[in-house]
Image (cartoon, grey):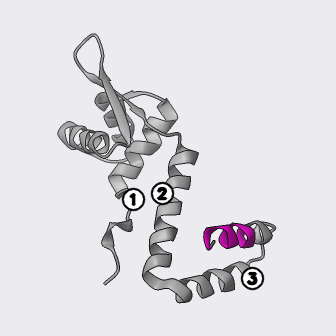
């Protein structure tokens, strides 16, 4: 059975991280205010998810003068996504081997993008 730990962030975690990356540093209240622009959500829900992101090592936090935590992303968005993508692809290759490689190659070869040559080279590097 495939490893089910390849999911990097849940939907709410992703939304929160987008806000933190945009704001550079955020309190639970600041994130809540942004999320409430699109849906109703409890303060405690946001606080719990941000605390769990801290526990996962995705956010770091420090206490401000008022005693509230201020959160900062451990990695910028580009670095985080690069690291997460690498983990997902390596796990996928480990689980599915040659079938995964064949599918990657087929997708890359039929791609109508200028990036296909870069992707082919990156895939070769990954398989070394």
Mark 2 to mark 1: distance in Å? 7 Å
Q: Position of residue 90 (x, y in %)?
A: 50, 69
Above or below: residue 115 compared with residue 31: below
Percent from the top left, x then y, of residue 79?
55, 46
Q: Residues within 10 Å of mark 3 (few under 14, many from 20)?
A: some
Q: Does the magenta stretch include residue 74?
A: no
Q: Quadrant of residue 19?
A: top left
Q: Where is residue 69 in the image (x, y as percent from the top left)?
A: 28, 24
Front in this rendered view, residue 31 or 102? 102
Q: Are marks 2 and 1 in contact (CB under 8 Å)?
A: yes
What numbered label is drawn on residue 8? 1
Which residue is disc 2 drawn over?
Answer: 84
Q: Are marks 1 and 3 in contact (CB under 8 Å)?
A: no
Front-most of residues 74 and 34: 74
- The stretch of residues the image draws in magenta is 119-127
Please indicate whether residue 11 sits to the left or right of residue 114 in the image: left
Residue, far top: 65
- Label 3 residue SS: helix
**Alpha carbons under labels 2 and 3: distance apart:** 24 Å
Query: Dot 1: few (<14), some (14–19), or many (≥20) neighbours within 10 Å?
Result: few
Dot 2: what SS?
helix
Which label's residue is closer to the chain start, 2 or 3?
Answer: 2
Identity of the residue drawn at 48% across and 57% down: 84
Local secondary structure at mark 1: loop
Residue 106 percent location from the top left of the image: 67, 86
Q: Which of marks 2 and 1 is nearer the N terminus?
A: 1
> Badges 2 and 3: C-beta atoms under 8 Å apart?
no
Among the 4 quarters of the image, the one containing residue 60: top left
Gap in angstroms between the C-alphas marked 1 and 3 = 27 Å
Q: Residue 42 carries which label?
A: none
Q: Does residue 75 appear to the left or right of 2 in the view shown?
A: right
Q: Residue 109 carries which label?
A: 3
């Amino acid at each position: 059975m495939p490893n089910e730990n390849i999911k990097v962030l849940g939907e709410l975690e992703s939304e929160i991280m987008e806000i933190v990356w945009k704001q550079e540093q955020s309190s639970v209240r600041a994130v809540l205010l942004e999320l409430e622009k699109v849906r109703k959500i409890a303060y405690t829900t946001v606080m719990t998810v941000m605390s769990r992101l801290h526990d996962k090592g995705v956010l770091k936090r420090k206490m401000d003068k008022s005693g509230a935590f201020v959160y900062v992303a451990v990695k910028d968005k580009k670095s985080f996504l690069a690291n997460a993508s690498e983990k997902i692809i390596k796990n996928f290759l480990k689980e599915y081997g040659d079938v995964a490689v064949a599918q990657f190659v087929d997708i890359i070869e039929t791609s109508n993008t200028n990036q296909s040559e870069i992707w082919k080279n990156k895939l070769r590097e990954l398989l070394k």
